[in-house]
Image (spheres, rainbow, N blue to C red):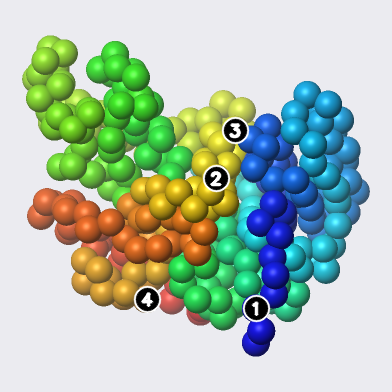
Amino acid sequence: MEQKKLNSRKCAMVGCGFVGSASVYALMQSGLFSEIVLIDANRQKAEGEALDISHGLPFAKPMSIYAGDYADLADAAIVIVTAGAAQKPGETRLDLVKKNVGIFKSIIPQIAAVNQDCILLIVANPVDVLTYAALKLSGFPKERVIGSGTVLDSARFQQMLGEHLDVDSRSVNAFIIGEHGDSEIAAWSSANIAGVPIHRVCEMRGFTDHDYETHRIAEAVKNSAYEIIEKKGATYYGIGMSVTRICEAIIRNELSILPVSTLMCGQFGLEDICLSMPAFVGSHGVDTLLPFELDVSELLALQKSAATLKKVIEEAEL
């Protein structure tokens, strides 16, 4: 099939709930795009969000924000999918899988029918399973189907470490890897502050009980979404900013290192599954994975995380 000319200044948002609308708001403020089309099963919801956000355009960069249908995303460079059932209080991300795989079986073929050349950015949960579903349902090459993965989890990790150590979180280099969910792994062995191993900085700051602190912070990161959902019903601002960061890396061809969810093809002994590892992200999607080193306990935890996801995928019959 001949490749279409895409508009690198255009993106589409499929799903206009809390996450979709917050992401469009963040994207509007970023100035990355000159055109954003919103699509939702409830057309009035898409129209309302487009109107509300577009009324702020006099304070931002010139762009067109409007509600549309699937035909309108034919030339979009990035199609973001947030559509799906919301996570309820007390419900794990993996509890959502069957409902949302069913929704994807309707959405993804409609996207692929009009645009075979875009990058698909999957944000709906459980994101790793749905990234795998989108890959299978779209027929796209693996580098152009990306899940938001643990980009937000890693940001939470960096923010909490920065707060703990009283240092700018932008100087913290630390990743959450594996599943975006209950089996995620805090990669402590590679965590550092501006290149200095994290434990050395902790000791400098007076924290010497490493086992206690690492467990406490990793648990706080893992449970932060549940805490937010319990307190306010949904999470959307943090993921909206994460979506914008991923789009920025793609549109500007930054080849930035982001822990996005992508298909594993033998790395760490993992095959035919999507999960998060630090990757080079640019205009072609996932360029390659970073040659990331894990200690033995992290590797075992990653393989366990992958086995959890494999089981869910099998149950979803993908």
On the image, numbered disc 4 is attached to which residue? 272
Tag on residue 237?
A: 3
Q: Quadrant of the N terminus?
A: bottom right
- Displayed quadrant of residue 114: bottom right
Front tag of 2 and 3: 2
**Cβ atoms at labels 3 and 4 below 8 Å apart:** no
On the image, numbered disc 1 is attached to which residue? 3
Q: Amino acid at mark 1?
A: Gln
Q: Position of residue 28 (x, y in %)?
A: 71, 37
Q: Amino acid at mark 3?
A: Tyr
Q: Amino acid at mark 2?
A: Glu
**2 or 3: tag closer to the N-terminus:** 3
Front tag of 1 and 4: 1
Cα distance between the residues tagged 2 and 4: 28 Å
**Cβ atoms at labels 2 and 3 below 8 Å apart:** no
Q: Secondary structure at mark 4?
A: strand
Q: Position of residue 97 (x, y in %)?
A: 54, 62
Q: Secondary structure at mark 3?
A: helix
Cα distance between the residues tagged 1 and 3: 35 Å
Cα distance between the residues tagged 1 and 2: 23 Å
Q: Secondary structure at mark 1?
A: loop
Q: Amino acid at mark 4?
A: Asp
Residue beneath the point at 22% across and 54% down:
292
**2 or 4: tag closer to the N-terminus:** 2
